[in-house]
Image (spheres, rainbow, N blue to C red):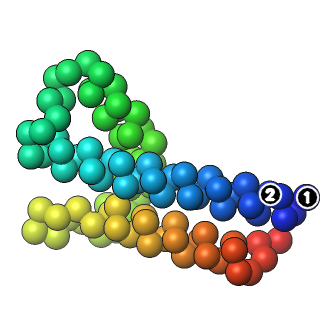
Amino acid sequence: MISALRFLLIDIISIYFYVVIAAVIASWLVAFGIINSYNPIARRILHILHALTEPLFAPVRRILPAIGGLDLSPLIVLLLLGFIRNWLLVGSLF
């Protein structure tokens, strides 16, 4: 049971890792004008990505503000997710 729960958490973290990467790429595409954020489909996808990632980005942004206009919160979140995932793979959570 514990092992199954641990592997479920590892899978959720792995999926969320890709969601964060997708949010970063989407924000770059909007910033460079490749994606039109007025398009209803694009706006909906951007809203979903924002809703999924902002709960973790916001606390990191409060601690580490943007440096020279560069938001480092996705990088910190990806590092934390990787650390937690590796800890779950190697160590025991419970």
The amino acid marked with disc number 1 is Met
Residue at numbered disc 2 = 5
Q: Secondary structure at mark 2?
A: helix
User: Residue 89, how many percent across, how many down?
Assistant: 69, 74
Judge the density around disc 1: few (<14), some (14-19), many (≥20) Cα neighbours within 10 Å.
Answer: few
Measuring 18% from the left and 29% from the top, which residue is drawn there? Answer: 37
- CA–CA distance between discs 1 and 2? 6 Å
Measuring 56% from the left and 58% from the top, which residue is drawn there? Answer: 14
User: Residue 94, how many percent across, how many down?
Assistant: 83, 71
Residue at numbered disc 1 = 1
- Give whichever of 54, 41 is nearer the camera: 41
**Residue situated furthest front in the rendering:** 34
Q: Secondary structure at mark 1?
A: loop
Left or right, residue 83 beside residue 68: right
Does the residue at mark 1 contact the one at mark 2 (Cβ under 8 Å)?
yes
Instruction: Say if residue 62 shows up in the picture.
Output: no
Relative to 37, residue 49 above or below: below
- Give whichever of 41, 81 is nearer the camera: 41
Instruction: Say if residue 57 shows up in the picture.
Output: yes
**Residue situated furthest top in the rendering:** 40
On-image quarter of the N terminus: bottom right
